[in-house]
Image (cartoon, rainbow, N blue to C red):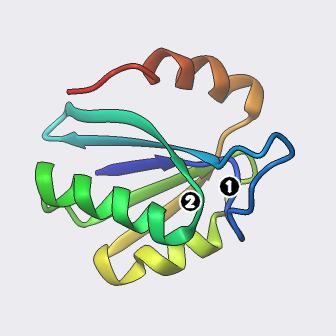
Amino acid sequence: MFVICCPEDSTFSLDRTGEPSALSLFLASNGQLKFANSFQAGSLEEVRYFVMAIKEKFCNGNSCLLCNDEGSLPAIKEILQPFFTSIDEVALAAAHSEPFMGLFSDIIL
C-alpha cells in the first residue's frame, strides 16, 4: 500500500517562502516498509512522476492512502485514479503528523 502525505493539493503553487510543496511517500508490502522518502513537488505532474516511479520500482500494489491535515486531496486523487483500484483519504491533525513525518524524512531504503 502507498501512503502519500502532502500538506497542499489543489494547484501546487509555490508557498510564501517560494518552496514547492513537500510530498512524503511511504510504501509497505506484506507488513514491511519498503520505501520512505520526501520530495519537493512543484506540480501535479511531479507528484504523478514520483508516485509512479516508486510504484514501478518497488511493487505493483493497487491501493493508496492519501493523508493531509484536512483529509482531502482531490487533485492528487484525480491524477492517480487511473493507476490504483482503491484510493482512500485520511485527515491527520498537524500536531500529530509533524513529529511522525520528521522521523522518516531521511530514510531511504
Residue 27, image x and y in percent?
28, 43
Task: Give the residue pinned by disc 1.
Answer: 71
Q: Nearer the viewer, residue 90 or 21?
A: 21
Task: Give the residue pinned by disc 2.
Answer: 89
Residue 98, image x and y in percent?
66, 24
- At horizontal 24% and vertical 58% (from top left) the residue drawn is 53
- State the residue lying farthest toward the front: 18
Which numbered marker is on residue 22?
none
Graded by Cα atoms within 10 Å as few (under 14), some (14 to 19) or many (20 or more), the crowding at tag 1 reads some
Quadrant placement of the C terminus: top left
- At horizontal 47% and vertical 78% (from top left) the residue drawn is 79
- At horizontal 64% and vertical 48% (from top left) the residue drawn is 21
- State the residue lying farthest toward the bottom: 82
Asked if marks 2 and 1 touch (Cβ < 8 Å), the reply is: yes
Residue 16, image x and y in percent?
87, 45
Image quadrant where residue 8 sits:
bottom right
Q: Is residue 89 left or right of residue 107?
A: right
In this rendering, the answer to whether 55 lies above or below 11 is: above
Say whether disc 2 or disc 1 marks the residue closer to the N-terminus: 1
